[in-house]
Amino acid sequence: MFYRWILLCALAFAAAAPAQAETAPDEMIHQLSVEVIDAVKADKAIQAGDVGKILALVDAKVMPLVNFPLMTKNAVGRRWNEASPEQQKRLQEEFKALLIRSYSGALTLVKNQTVELKPPTLKLSDSEVEVRTLVVGGKEPIPLGYRLEKSSGQWKIYNVNVLGSWLVDNYRNRFAQELSAGGIDGLINYLAGLNKPGAKS
């Protein structure tokens, strides 16, 4: 479905190139949204759902400007502190693989979409903001929001809102069930199972 493409690109939009420390978060997201969409349109392999190409895109463009450790920690919730460093590493690896696997095929739906900012940027704290955008060019406009925090002079995404639903919060609800049933190792095994070829997420 189209919203799956939005979820993956929500992360990619803010990471198409190195950010400047003085760049406002809304300006950064809008500028780089255009760059990423253009890159996807120009890459036939990504449009065809080439997982290797998508993984390369995520590693090179997305991860440097996403606080993925914080995103994973928030998705796991209060049980995160029970995990050993090795378990935390595995959780991050499996969560990243799940996101890529779940949304890779939706990149084939990129056509004539563009992104518009919806000001004002909301200040959540001295170091956190929420930037709202609107994806247009499809059948219906799709609201898309980002929560970013500033650390060491750089803005990084730690949550994404699509159609009024926060990505991390949705996964936290799913993960809570697995944690209750099998603890940290149970969640890792659950994610690993979802990431096996042919598995349904």
Image: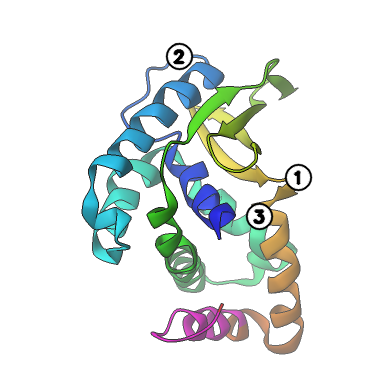
Report helix, strand or loop for mark 1: loop
Say above or below: 54 vs 177: above
Instruction: Specify the quadrant of the image occupied by residue 186.
Output: bottom right
Say above or below: 143 vs 120: below
Residue 136 belongs to magenta span? no
Say above or below: 120 vs 92: above
Q: Amino acid at mark 2?
A: Thr
* Residue 171 on image: x %, y %: 67, 64
Distance from label 1 to label 3 (Cα)?
A: 12 Å
Mark 3 Cα within 10 Å, few/some/many (few <14, many 20+)?
Answer: some
Q: Amino acid at mark 3?
A: Val
Which residue is label 1 attached to? 164
Q: Is residue 12 left or right of residue 39?
A: right
Q: Point out which mark residue 168 bears.
A: 3
Which residue is label 2 attached to? 23
> Magenta segment range?
187-200
Q: Amino acid at mark 1?
A: Gly
